[in-house]
Amino acid sequence: MSQTGETVKPQLGSLGGPQAPRVVTSAGSGGFSALAGRMVPWFFVGLFLLFVVAFLIAPTVVLVVQTFIGDNGFTLSYLTGLWDYQYRIAFENSIILGVASAFVGLVGGTFLAYSTLQPGAPPILRSIVTSFSAVATNFAGVPLAFAFISTLGSLGMVTIALKHIGINIYAMGFSLYSLTGLTVTFAYFQIPLMLIIITPAIEGLRAQWREASDGLGATSLQYWRLIGLPILAPSLLGGFLLLFGSAFSAFATPYALTDGNIALVTIDISNVLSGNVMSDPQVGAALSTGMILVMAVVLIIYSLTARYAARWRR
Amino acid sequence: MSGAIITAESEAVAQAPVPRPRKAYGARTSLSLFNWIVLGLGGIFFFVPLLVTALFSLWEGGNTYGWSAYDKMLHTPGFWDSLFLSLRLAAETIILSFILMVPAMIFVHLKAPKLKPLFEFISNLPFVIPAIALIDGLTTLYTGPTWLISTPNYLVIPYFFLALPYAYRSLDVGLSTLDVRTLTEACQSLGAGWGQIIFLVLLPNLRTALVGAVMLILTTVIGEFTFASVLLFHTFAVFINDTGQNEITEASALTIFAFLLVWLFMLGVILTGRKGAATVGGAH
C-alpha cells in the first residue's frame, strides 16, 4: 500500500510541474490558437449541416419545386395528376400494403414479445428470439424475396407440398406476387422489428399492476382491456407507424419479388427514373413529393405518440 | 330447455364469488398453452423459409444433393467484384459517417445542447424521405461533375443518409451514458488538446456504440439495392438480383450467403453491445 502511494505522488508532481507554465504561455500567446480551438467544433458542426443541406435538403426542395413548375411557370397539374387512376392505384396499394403488413407485424411482434417475456419462459429462449429478431429485421430486400419465392412461389416447396395434400393455395386465390404475398413476405422483417420496438414497453408493465388487479378480482381480459392495453397503446401506435413507414417506402423487396410488375409508388418512381415508361420527370417528382407528404404526416403523429409512450417508463 | 339454461346461469352465479386459485403473476414457472402456440407459429414462419432455401441451394436436380450451387456461386463472374465493391463502399460510408458525425455530435453534447433537437430532427429526415425519393432528387439536382457521379463512390452519399438514423441513435445512446463534460474537463486540466481528448479518451469509451454503428452500416450497405440499381452500379445486392432471377439454386445459395453475412454482422453487435443496443438497420 505505502509503496503504491509513494509511486503515485511523484507522478502527480511531475505532471503538475510542467503543467502550470504551459497554461500560462497558451493564455499569453494564444490569441490565434484559442480562436482556432473555439472554431474547430463549429467547423465540424458546420460541415455536417452543410453536407445535410447539400445532399438531403436541396434534392428534396428540388423535387418539390419541380412538382409545381411546368413549361409555363407555376402549375398544379402534376400534383393533381397523381389523382389519375394509374397513380392513385399505386398510392392506394402502397398504403394498403403499409397498413396490412404493419398490422401483421404489430399483432405478431407483440404476441411473440409477450410470450418470450413471460416470467416462466426459459432464458435461452429469450436470447434466441432477441438475436434472431436482430438478424431477421435486417434480412430484407433481394435475398428475402428469393427465400419466399423458394417457399411460397408458384413452384415453391411449401406450395408444392400443400398441393400434394390437396390444398392448392394458388387456385384459392393466393399469389406471392400480389399485395397479399407481399404482406406475408414483409411480415418476415416487420414482426421482428415490432418485437424489438415493443419489448421495452412490455418489460415496463410492472408485475405489481397485474398482482393488484388479480388481487381485486379482475379477470385476465379486464386487466388487458383496462390496464395493460391503455398503457401499451402509445408504444403500439408508435411501432405501428414505424412499421407502416418501412413498408410504405420499401422498394427492393417488392421489386425483386415481382420483377417490378406491381403498382406501388416506389416501383412507379423507379420506372420513371430508369426510363421504362414514357413520362415527364415531373411525374416522378410529384410521386416522390406525394410519398414525402405521407411520411411527414406519419412522423408528426409518431412524435406526438412518443411523448405519451415515455410516461410510464421506469 | 329453459331449465337447462337456468341451471347453467345459476351455476355461473354460484361460481363467481369464489375466485379460481391462481399463482401470483411473478411466480408462474411455465408458459401457458397460448404462449407455446404463439412461439410455435413464430418458429415455423421464421424457420421454414430458411430451411426451404437451404434445401434448394443444395439441390442438384432429381434426387441428388450437393454443394455445386455454392461452388458455382463462388466462380460466377462478378461475385467477388461486387462483394468487394459493397464492402469497400461500406468502409467508405463508415469513414464518412465518423468524420461527419462523431466530432459534431461530441461538440453538440458538450457545448451546444441547444442544437440537439436539430440533430435529432435531421437524423429522422431519412425516414421521411424514402430512398427512392432521395435518389430521384439527387439525380435531378446533380448531373455533374463527372468525377463525383460516374463512379460507384457516389453511392456513399445516399448510403450515409440511409445509415444516418441508426448511426445517430447508436452514437447518441453511447454519448448519453458517458459523462462527456467531466471527462473533457479532466483531460483539459491535465493539458490535453482536442485531438488527444477525442482519440485517447472519448473514442475508446464510445467503442461499444462505435462497433454498433459500424455493424449497422455494414448490414445496411451490403443489403442496399435501391440506390445501386437506379444508378446502375453493380453492388452485391444488384449482383444477387441479376444472377438469381435466372438460377433458382444459385439464388438460394446467394440468399443463404447473404443471411449468414447479416447474422455475422449482428453477432458483432450483440457480442460487443450492451443490453438494448440498437440492432435495427434498414434497406427494405
Image (cartoon, coloured by chain):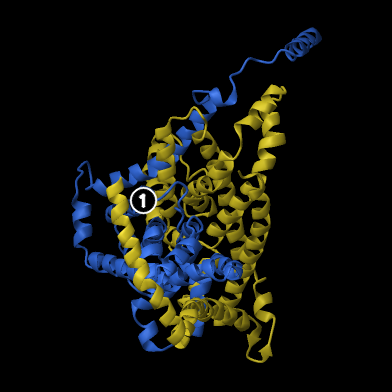
Chain colours: A yellow, B blue
Residue A184 placement (x, y as % from top left) = 50, 48
- B98 over A75 or under it: above or below: above
**Quick check: B82 above or below A177?**
below
Q: Quadrant of residue A281?
A: bottom right
Q: Is residue A121 above or below residue B122?
A: above
At 49% across and 23% down in the image, what residue appears? B29
Please state if B94 lies on the left or on the right of B2 as rendered.
Answer: left
Q: Residue A182 or A28: which is nearer the viewer? A: A28
Of A163 and B126, nearer the camera is B126
Q: Position of residue A24 (x, y in %)?
A: 43, 79
Taking A239 as reference, is B97 left or right? Answer: left
Q: Chain of mark 1?
A: B
Q: Residue at x 59, y 80 (%)?
A: A61
Residue A158 can be seen in this image = no
Above/below status of A185 relative to B128: above
**Mark 1 belongs to which amino acid?**
Thr
Residue A299 position by quadrant: bottom right
Q: Residues within 10 Å of mark 1 (few under 14, many from 20)?
A: some
Compare residues A297 and B250 and report the one nearer the observer: A297
Expressed as whole percent of the image width and height from the top left, the position of residue B207 reads 37, 58
**Position of the C terminus of chain A by quadrant:** top right
Residue beneath the point at 54% across and 57% down:
A247
Q: Position of residue B273 (x, y in %)?
A: 40, 50
Viewer-side residue, A169 vs B220: B220
Q: Say whether residue B187 is visible.
A: yes
Q: Is residue B238 left or right of residue A77?
A: left
Mark 1, residue position: B272
Could you tell me which quadrant the N terminus of chain A lies in? top left
Classify residue B143 by image quadrant.
Answer: bottom left
- Residue at 50%, 61% in the rendered image: B172
